Image (cartoon, coloured by chain):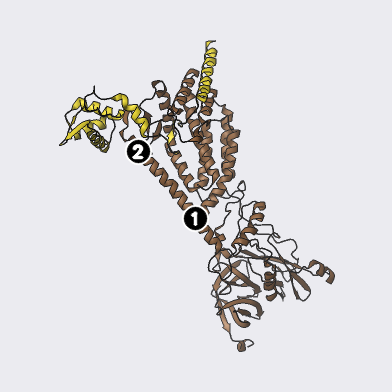
Amino acid sequence: MSEIFLKIVNMSISASYLILAVVLLRLALKKAPKWISVALFAVVAIRLICPFTVESVLSLIPSGETVSPDILTNTSPGISSGIPAIDNSLNPVINDTFKPEVGASVNPMQVLVLVASVIWLVGAVSLIVYALISYLRIKHRIATAVLVRRNIYKSENVASPFVLGLIKPRIYLPFNTDPRDEAYIIAHEEAHIRRRDYVWKPLGYLLLTLHWFNPFVWLGYILLCRDIESACDEKVIKELGANERADYSEALLTCSVKKRLISVCPLAFGETGVKGRIKSVLNYKKPAFWIIVIAIIAGVALAACFLTNPLSSEEPTPPENVADESIVYYAWKGNYTSTKHKEAVMEYISSRQPTVHNSENGIYIKANARIKAVTVRVFSAKGMSDEEIDMTANSMIAPMVEGDYYAFVDIGWLNRIEESEREYTILSYLVTVRDENNEKHHYYFRVDYRKTVARDPSVISSLMFDIDGDGKEDMCQIVTEAEGLKSYIYYAIRDAETGEVKYRTERFIGGTGTNYISYLQVYGDKLLVVRTHQTSVAVGSTPDYYKLSIDNGELRITYVNENDLWK
Amino acid sequence: MMETPKVFESEYRFCLILWEHEPIKSSELVALCKEQLGWKPTTTYTVIKRLSDRGVLVNDNTMVRALVTKEEIQASEIDEMMEKTFDGSLPAFIAAFTKHRKMSDREIDAIQHMIDAYRKESSGKEGK
């Protein structure tokens, strides 16, 4: 139920922008026929009920999914409203308040969302029940209404005329309706029937019950009801002469005056509803053709801009400060983390020394970090003096050195990479390789964790490694999740001929307890995996050796005894 | 002397049918009410029971007979009864002609003036 509630919340937020636009457009199109205003609200209805939409560059909606369902499981919860000012001010608070404790049995965000869903459901059901009860009471009251002709009935239990019935709508009038007014009243109600308002109004109310928590939707419904009445007025009077319009106004006035002076509804007193309608009736002029054309164009533009969602985040291009030598880099966006975590991140980084792997094809650098916490920039300090290196460095650098290259892994925060504000579970590896002619080739390895078994990777170790023995390096990655309880090996094979990259994921036989892969190293055709165990009393490391190979397109992981390692 | 029972306008229309055809089998009365009043059978039976309780008619072994004549019925009480029994407010999802609201005399007059002025102005134009 939490997921349904979040979907509705997101639809509601998107619709609110649309409602605002419709309200403004309505003001601008005052001279246009009112049925167009009603049609604009039909667009709103689509947004409120349809969870699917297309993405478009025309979209003016800041975010199609302000509250992602991931917020329930994210270790750094936050929203993505599409408005940086809002995100940056709200997300730190959300994160501080609702960050789930490691090892705690409840996730506070899940509790909050569940409670909110229940409140929402109660509200919606109450409104529906109220509507059903009202409907049944009216039906009971008009049971004895007598047929006048066709679909027109009269009853002593009707104080003001209305239309009722979803399938076969009927017009109900009071018995003591003034005969001078009757024709106009019937014309108005028949306009309601021809326009099918007896369907649209309850439908709108139904949407209101689903979105009752959103004041914009209330505003939209109130305006919709007003526009429906005006549209019916227009439909009736556009064929009438001046005197008849005055008579119509008299009918409106008569029917809206409450004869009984005892009233418990102070809000109704002095409302300009009837006055406004009569004014519009008396001042009505047939709208010019070009106004109608403009209004329709505006409506279509509205649909294009507000029924669509913004384009989702593209894959990031490599940051500018990536060294021009062959390196592997990875970068992703987590949600905002608070400053408390800076030291913790440092710990993780320093305990998992990034390493550089220098092969004849190029230099590959891997660095490990808690995936949710950091973005990583990698750049080469080749050619920089020691001093320059020092000045570039900050306290969060993990230096990696091998051979001629100094490389620094700079732990930055999520603002550093601007491509996406969202939590990001795609890792990209840009591998640049020099061939025998010293020409550069780029290979893009992409790991999309949304498509893998590993749902919530907390540690990733990766390296380039020739898995299938074709002399071309492939990519091997070990992903540890669930605080070290599960490990997955994920690899990407690069086809020797075509350069095409194929992906696989495989469950890795892990050890007991909490294990982090702290070190990977390739020895010939074998992979060294060092796992660090963490229990409450001890930290220890176990080196395991595995032979990776591809057999018939399947990855084989064979445990290798240390004694056999060098054979 | 026994007080003459009061009836609603809708019940009065029912009584008109009864007076014309009485004494009449209740099932035939149901058919007539369906045809002339548009009433569902359950409605007709409910009304028969209600009016029987009020002493307006008697339903004797499915034969229905009026106990009151047309002249005796106090139709003038109808409006008074109606006003007392309900307030006439309609929920938002019903398509109505207009909202029933309390307006001050001044407001009503102001609007009436607006309409009258419009009439004068338009008739002046049309006269030319």
Q: Do discs 1 and 2 share a chain? A: yes
Vertical placement of A115 versus A185: above or below?
A: below
Chain at numbered mark 1: A
Percent from the top left, x then y, of residue A76? 61, 63
Q: Among the chains, which one is brown?
A: A
- Residue A257 pos. (x, y %): 45, 27
Q: Is residue B8 left or right of residue A98?
A: left
In the rendered structure, which disc, 1 or 2, sits on the residue that comes first in sequence? 1
Residue that numbered label 2 is attached to? A139
Residue A155 in view (yes/no): no
Q: Is residue A378 visible?
A: yes
Quadrant of residue B15 in the image? top left
Q: Residues within 10 Å of mark 2 (few under 14, many from 20)?
A: some
Chain designation of label 2:
A
Residue at the (62%, 79%) spot, across then down:
A532
Quadrant assignment for the C terminus of chain A: bottom right
Residue under label 1, please give it. A117
Name the residue type under label 2.
Lys
The amino acid marked with disc number 1 is Ser
Disc 1 is placed on an element classified as: helix
Colour displayed for chain B in the image of the structure = yellow
Q: Position of residue A561 (x, y in %)?
A: 59, 86
| Residue under the image location 47 percent in, 25 percent down | A253
- Outermost residue, top side: B128
What element does badge 2 sit on? helix
Q: Nearer the viewer, residue A68 or A339?
A: A339
Q: Tell me the distance, in whole angstroms, between the alpha carbons under discs 1 and 2.
A: 33 Å
